[in-house]
Image (spheres, rainbow, N blue to C red):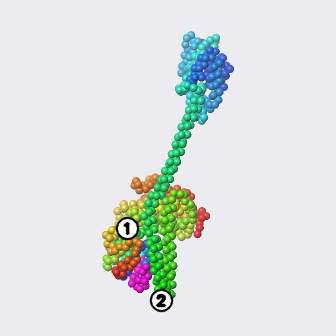
């Protein structure tokens, strides 16, 4: 084949590919490239071409469709170049890898196009072509846009379905989380029950005793009055008055404990109220201690407290702060008890101390134990939910993480300092804001 | 004979002083109070072998009533004090431990003061 004929063939083939794929194909030049009786088959039913006119329609439709495809690109890979017969028939096969974006989804279309060109009257023309795809299809358009749209819609449906499932899962998880928080509350309430019983029993005994003794004192006072000993009668009346104050005091003490217990287990979100932090701290300190004592008779520890009298009342959610304290106290008692159990000498004196302190704009509550400290490798994880070093079933691993969240919600800080074999110290700091009420 | 009452509840003192008002006034009963096991031991040491009856609560922070009982029975032998333990209702475990440690008598909370009065007068 002459060079000229060969060049002409390549040029015609190039023009043919441009007709199929170019952004602005020169459709009016189709007569120079495609034979009048061209025969073409594509991959869809509409692509059955038996004349140049229908080829022009197809190419036009293809051009129109491409306008809707974003980022339309293609690469060409030569598969076959064959000249047959007397150099007048050429078979060219190329693989065109098309890519474009439709509805935000990137699509790839592997297309193989086989073209037969015939040399007639000094020029090459396309007489036959066949396009095939590595995609199964019977209906649709040249670029499979409709089909892909449908596919995308199907995918979207699937995505929607999955999203709904995931949303349900999240709802379920949240419900589970709430249940866990509630069970942590109930678990810590269990720790409290014995302490509560003990703490209520004592004030109740006082209420009963002081009212009984007052009753007797009234009789005695009357006897003294009958005898005419006004001084003694007056002295007795002072005692009676004091006793009535004691009855009120211990009645309120029991009342506070029951309220605290109810608040502790309540699932609703508490409200901030002016709270006597010293009183709250002491209440939970005793509850935690007696709770453990009641469970384990051999348990004992020295309690040390140092409350700052200038603390006043600050706005907090008392049951939440109480929950944090209960947790810190229970952990501290657990730590000293563990050290005592493992310790070989009798010199170890388990001690848990609590102190409150008012600085300029925060109050600080410090809970310190002289237990074995927190190991370095655990220190970073102690505020993570479900992290616990206690034996299975002994701790939920939620105590400190809940405490951390509660203090954060109060815009405060919960920090820890510890030394191996020596101590662990938790510090709660909560801003006072302008809520100091005396 | 002195009666040493050991309890971490401060109001116990006022209660006893009133419950035994007449007896105290007449000088029949003489009460001393300690608010922890440690304080009780100090008081006992200071009393220097004086005959004493001890009435102790069990559930106290720091040294418990049982530890106090054990120490008393070990360290204070001449003359051996009478130790009466106050146990919570239905607390078998503490009751048995106290008995093993040599407690002389028991009272159940809430304390029946009439019964206590009878017992005290009988012993003293």
Left or right: A372, with B78 as reference point: right
Q: Which mark is residue A227?
A: 2
**Residue beneath the point at 41% across and 72% down:** B110
Quadrant for residue A289, please give it.
bottom left
**Is the residue A14 above or below the residue A295 in the image?**
above
Q: Chain of mark 2?
A: A
Residue A249 % position (x, y): 50, 72
Chain name for mark 1: B
Q: Is residue A242 visible?
A: yes
Is A324 rendered above or below residue B32? above
Residue A203, which numbered label?
A: none
Residue A54 place in picture, x, y as percent: 63, 19
The answer to whether residue B20 is magenta is yes
What span is in magenta? B18-33
Q: Residue at x 40, y 65 (%)?
A: A293
Query: Is residue A120 shown in magenta?
Result: no
- Total numbered labels placed on residues in the image: 2
What's the mark number on residue B90?
1
Q: Quadrant of the N terminus of chain A?
A: top right
Task: Judge whether residue A419 can be spotted in this image.
Answer: no
User: In the image, residue A322 lies at what x, y percent?
Assistant: 50, 62
Same chain for mark 2 and mark 1? The answer is no
Quadrant for the C terminus of chain A in the image: bottom right
- Under circle 2, the secondary element is helix
Name which residue lies at 51% across and 70% down. Answer: A252
Q: Position of residue A417 (x, y in %)?
A: 48, 59
In front: label 2 or label 1: 2
Q: Are marks 2 and 1 in contact (CB under 8 Å)?
A: no
The image quadrant that residue B59 belongs to is bottom left
**Viewer-nearest residue: B116 or A401:** B116
């Amino acid at each position: 084949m002459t060079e000229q004929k060969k060049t002409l063939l390549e040029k015609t083939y190039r023009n043919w590919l441009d007709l199929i794929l170019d952004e602005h194909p020169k459709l009016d030049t189709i007569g120079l490239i495609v034979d009048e009786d061209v025969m073409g088959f594509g991959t869809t039913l509409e692509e059955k071409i038996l004349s140049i006119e229908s080829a022009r329609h197809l190419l036009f439709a293809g051009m129109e469709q491409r306008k809707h495809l974003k980022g339309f690109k293609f690469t060409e890979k030569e598969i076959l170049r064959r000249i047959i017969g007397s150099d007048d028939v050429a078979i060219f096969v190329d693989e065109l890898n098309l890519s474009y974006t439709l509805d935000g989804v990137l699509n790839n279309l592997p297309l193989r196009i086989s073209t037969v060109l015939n040399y007639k009257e000094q020029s090459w023309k396309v007489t036959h072509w066949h396009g095939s795809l590595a995609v199964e299809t019977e209906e649709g358009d040249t670029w499979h846009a409709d089909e892909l749209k449908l596919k995308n819609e199907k995918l979207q449906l699937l995505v929607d379905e999955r999203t709904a499932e995931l949303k349900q899962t999240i709802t379920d998880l949240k419900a589970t989380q709430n249940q866990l928080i509630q069970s942590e509350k109930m678990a810590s309430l269990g720790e409290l029950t014995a302490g509560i019983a003990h703490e209520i029993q004592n004030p109740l005994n006082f209420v009963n005793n002081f009212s009984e003794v007052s009753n007797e004192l009234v009789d005695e006072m009357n006897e003294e009055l009958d005898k005419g000993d006004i001084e003694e009668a007056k002295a007795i009346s002072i005692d009676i008055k004091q006793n009535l104050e004691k009855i009120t005091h211990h009645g309120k003490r029991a009342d506070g404990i029951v309220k605290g217990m109810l608040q502790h287990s309540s699932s609703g979100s508490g409200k901030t109220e002016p709270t006597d932090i010293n009183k709250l701290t002491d209440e939970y300190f005793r509850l935690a201690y007696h709770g453990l004592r009641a469970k384990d008779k051999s348990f004992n520890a020295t309690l040390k407290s140092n409350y700052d009298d200038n603390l006043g009342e600050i706005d907090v959610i008392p049951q939440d702060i109480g929950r944090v304290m209960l947790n810190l106290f229970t952990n501290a008692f657990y730590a000293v008890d563990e050290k005592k159990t493992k310790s070989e000498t009798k010199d170890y004196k388990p001690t848990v101390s609590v102190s409150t302190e008012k600085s300029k704009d925060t109050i600080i509550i410090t809970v310190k134990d002289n237990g074995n400290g927190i190991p370095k490798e655990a220190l970073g994880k102690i505020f993570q939910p479900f992290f616990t070093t206690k034996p299975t079933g002994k701790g939920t691993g939620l105590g400190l993480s809940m405490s951390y969240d509660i203090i954060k919600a109060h815009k405060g800080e919960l920090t820890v300092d510890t030394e191996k074999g020596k101590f662990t110290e938790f510090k709660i700091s909560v801003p006072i804001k302008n809520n100091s009420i005396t | 004979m002195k009666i040493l009452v050991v309890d971490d509840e401060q109001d116990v003192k006022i209660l006893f002083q009133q419950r035994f008002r007449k007896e105290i006034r007449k000088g029949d009963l003489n009460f001393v109070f300690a608010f922890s096991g440690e304080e009780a031991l100090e008081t006992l040491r200071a009393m220097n072998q004086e005959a004493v009856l001890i009435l102790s609560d069990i559930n106290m922070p720091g040294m418990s009533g049982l530890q106090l009982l054990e120490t008393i029975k070990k360290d204070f032998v001449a003359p051996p004090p009478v130790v009466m333990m106050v146990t919570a209702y239905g607390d078998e475990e503490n009751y048995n431990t106290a008995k093993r440690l040599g407690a002389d008598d028991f009272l159940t909370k809430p304390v029946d003061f009439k019964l206590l009065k009878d017992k005290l007068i009988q012993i003293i």
